[in-house]
Amino acid sequence: MNKLVVNSTEGGAHIKGSKRISLKNVIKKYCQDPIDKSVITPFLSYADNADELIKKVIPLLKQDIDNLNEIITNSKKGIAVSHGIKILINRPKYNRLLPKKTEKMFDKLNQKAIQEAQGNPLLVNQIFFEMAIAKLKKCRLKTIMIMSDKNFKYSEKAHIAAVKNPLVNVAIYGAIRQIATRGLKVDSTVNHFLKNKKDAIIRTERNMIILNAAKTASESLKKSYRKTLKLLKKYDKTKDHNLLTSFKKEPIVLKDAEDYFKAGNWAHPLLDAKKYMNQKECAIQKYEKAKKIYYKAIEMKNEAIQKAKKDEKEHHDKMIKLVKYNELLENAKDAGRIDKNFDRALELMKEAIKLMPDEQEARWGLATALHHAQKIKEAIIEYKKLIKDFPDNNTFRFEYGQVLLLENDLQEGLKQIGIVMEKTDEFDSFLSKLGEIYEHAGMDKEALIAYNSYLKKYPYDYKIWNKKGDCLTALNRKATAKKAYQKALDIKPE
């Protein structure tokens, strides 16, 4: 039997094997039969194995509560230690904690920890802290290291427990999004933490924000879970179905109607007003108030319907175009990726652009396709148009710079890439490539600057330490070159 799978996202997901049809046309064509709501009645009864399912749920809920307790406990400990670290490093006597000798020792211990951890990032910090604390004698730095070790352990335990609960994970993700700005990004190495007081404070505060989000979410969930567990245990004992059915009527509230209206919400006041007016007994004064709310809500409802109809009429043609546009994009991707028919892919991209010239996705796809098809001059033209129309899009300018480099326009290509890299650290990994370009062009001083900038962010890339050594050798700085080569060897002795 042939079945039709319809995709009515109208610009959302591209689902392979489905036919794109606008929601309005789907309703018009396929949703003609009246709905008999009584057919869902059997599904509203309890499942045949309800008692068995509840028996299985009870121990799972207990596990979840234990897990939430672990998050709460470790988050509290982590917040307390973070607060202590922040107070300590704010003191004037903690300004200079890291002598050169200790800094070098920490670098060596960190390398040793990386080797012993064998690729496990969690073990790296654990091993490093153990070795560093054992090496240090009684001093202010040792106190900070002991507290940092505890903070790391509590934070990791809270994080590992949080991974098991998707709702707590959402709260943590929200907190990370809240702090994920350029101003709050700091170097993550211990040496930098101890040398840069401002970054150390930011990093500590950031940790406290995340832990506090995990703790707050866990405490809120724990209340709900405990209430549910108590209810299910009681049901398991009594088998009283009334326990699982709510007979409590929602209160009718009319005094907050204006707040809802101000927010553009007419549905809630309309429902409450109707409920009140349908009561057998009600006060006349309050009935009149409910009636006013009802008519205002109806007026707002009608206005909303009229606006929706107007918007639908205005945007219908655009929606039809958007469905076709997305279909062309998907076919273009398949032509290039699966069939390797790049000429066909370019043809489809151009057709999509002609259909909706103001949309950027097909235009970017065309520029990228021309780039990969080695049609560099044509790609440059398309990237120039994109940058003109979307000047704040860093990706377009960055890719434009790369295409210019392929065209051997070194000066302009580096200029465009430089503009982007001044605005954002999103493309910092390109600094190593930038160093190679400078080095290939015989611009060893510029290459050295690029390599140094790259190594600040990625200090354990032994290949770039080697390249830095080559640059320094070319500049006749042999003693410094030797140190760079040695650094590469320390990272990768083989």
Image (cartoon, rainbow, N blue to C red):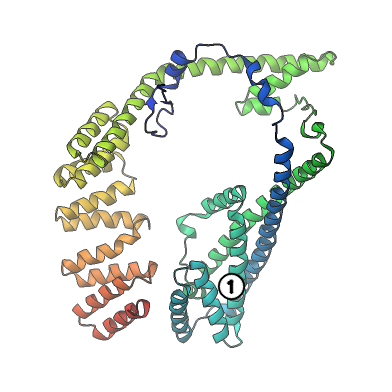
- Compared with 246, 340 (above or below) is below
Mark 1 is surrounded, within 10 Å at the Cα level, by few (under 14), some (14 to 19) or many (20 or more) other residues, namely: many
Residue at the (38%, 25%) spot, across then down: 20
- Relative height, residue 144 to residue 247 (above, below): below
Q: Is residue 250 above or below residue 280?
A: below
x and y percent of residue 188 in the render? 47, 67
Q: For this rendering, which residue is in front, 394 or 163?
A: 163
- Whether residue 1 sits left or right of residue 451 in the image: it is right
Is residue 380 found left or right of 312 in the rendered image?
Answer: left
Image quarter in which the C terminus is found: bottom left
What x and y, as percent, mark residue 196?
49, 72
Residue found at x 76% / y 45%: 229
x 80%, y 41%: residue: 236
Name of the residue lying farthest toward the bottom: 137
Q: Position of residue 157 (x, y in %)?
A: 61, 63
Q: Closer to the camera, 276 or 331?
A: 331
Amino acid type at circle 1 is Ser
User: In the rendered view, does 302 fall on the left or right side of 371?
Assistant: right
Please give the name of the residue rendered at 28% of the width and 67% of the height, measured from the top-left corner. 450
